[in-house]
Amino acid sequence: MLQGTGSDVGKSVLVAGLCRLFANEGLRVRPFKPQNMSNNAAVAAIPGADPAEDEWGEIGRAQWLQALACRTPPTVHMNPVLLKPQSETGSQIVVQGRVAGAARGRDYQRLKPALLARVLESFAIVSAEADLVIVEGAGSPAEINLRAGDIANMGFAVAADVPVVLVGDIDRGGVIASLVGTHAILPAEDRAAIAGFLVNKFRGDVSLFDEGLAAVTRFTGWPAFGVVPWLAGASRLPAEDSVALERMARQPAGAAAGDLLVAVPRLERIANFDDLDPLLHHPGVAVAFVAPGERLPERAGLVLIPGSKSTIADLAAFRRNGWDADLAAHHARGGRTLGLCGGYQMLGRRIRDPEGIEGEETEAEGLGLLDVETVMAREKTVRPVAARSPAGLPIEAYEIHMGTTDGPDRTRPLALVEGRPEGATSADGRVAGTYLHGLFAADRWRTQFLADLGVADAGSRYGAGVEAALDAIAADLARALDTRALLRIARGR
């Protein structure tokens, strides 16, 4: 199990890279994360359920990527507890792929002990089909105020008897203090579960940190498994959660004057923003994530409204930021607009939530650029989708949403799913919306969509780029880490 001295130390990428490394060696490898908090979700199989009945579940997108690294289909047991934040204090709780309710932070703390049994059940299921399971922690075990009832870090590791490797991030500074400090404050049982440590995100000559490794070992008694350099391939992988958005510049560095500028308003409850990842790596395209309080750039050729975990609340914030006026001006200039999932719902005439699923506001006027209306429903649509564009281009995608959308613009669908219309397009063809997540990963469809916006075909192949990045990261880790020692620890000797 990889645990970190803090959030965003690179655990997700390290797990993905190690999954690919050991899978390349012929081992049956599986990822596991007991508890994840993210609004970036993916569709996964529920073992024993009937896919023909559209019985699918959801897990964190990072575990989907790690399953890809293992070259195995994802299942809900790889991430048995997923928390999807809906407000500053509350989250939707997904257990073994299915929505189990919602809770505020303090209430959730009381639920965690009961969830440990479900976590251990999932871990046993994943372990039964694997030679090696690589587990990812969440946050840090140093958050000892959350230790009682913990299921994400040491609470799981001790209960499941899984050895832990502690990851420190040297890029943020203070890595020696963070590793030694974690050792100092952990209770003896938790400290004994840690088999060693590694240092991540090192820039420059790794040998310069030899004395640093020795100092950590001297203070803690833990052996070092290595120092991981800054992994160039990590930039080709989808980001796990909204922490990554804080590092994304409004105007991407290196954007050429002739690039298509895609403006993405950074919604407060943005969901599945990894939908945009294929655009971030497409030649001739620059993606600008627009922070609250900033204006949508006038030179944007496309405004893309992403998914949201709280559509009505994010629509109200959209208006508070003045983005509705910016979008109207963009449309008047002849610009194109696309809404994904919650963004699709916002573009319609009206959103109704008669059961108060999202909160106290039960109705909101939409942005009015699509002639459709949305009604929220308690039943959640979760399924993979094999779609085709009206021109016949294949789109492998997935749906995760609550609510149904209908209206006259649905007669001009964005795609066809089993011959049925999906999404909507305005009469002038400049505004469209869809529930399909992941459609930009469909190379032929993306290429045609961007060609209509003046971007030349550069032969970009997104999926191949992700696969190459995983292999490159695996090779870097093989050089940087004592992987034989890691395997010995996993085998208990």
Image (cartoon, rainbow, N blue to C red):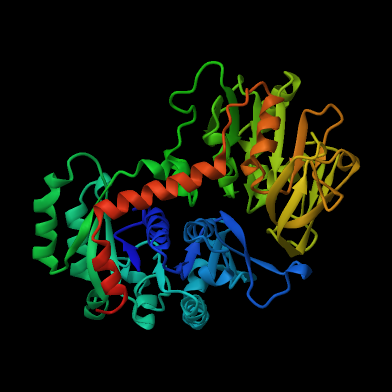
Left or right of residue 363, residue 275 in this image: left
Residue 483 against residue 341 in the figure, above or below: below
Residue 172 against residue 17 in the figure, above or below: above
Q: Residue furthest front?
A: 26
Residue 306 against residue 210 in the figure, above or below: above
Q: Residue at x 53, y 43 (%)?
A: 464
The spot of residue 67 in percent (x, y) is 51, 61
Q: Residue at x 74, y 44 (%)?
A: 434
Q: Quadrant of the C terminus?
A: bottom left
Question: In terms of depth relative to the viewer, which is nearer, 410 or 125?
Answer: 125
Q: Quadrant of the N terminus?
A: bottom left
Question: In terms of depth relative to the viewer, which is nearer, 477 or 172?
Answer: 477
Q: Quadrant of residue 447?
A: top right
Left or right of residue 102, residue 489 in this image: left
Q: Residue furthest top?
A: 257
Residue 379 appears in the picture as rendered: yes
Residue 237 appears in the picture as rendered: no
Question: In terms of depth relative to the viewer, which is nearer, 397 or 136?
Answer: 397
Residue 485 against residue 370 in the figure, above or below: below
- Count every numbered label the image shows and give the total: 0
The spot of residue 147 in percent (x, y) is 35, 74
Q: Residue at x 25, y 57 (%)?
A: 481
The spot of residue 405 in percent (x, y) is 82, 50
The spot of residue 226 in percent (x, y) is 21, 56
Q: Quadrant of residue 366?
A: top right
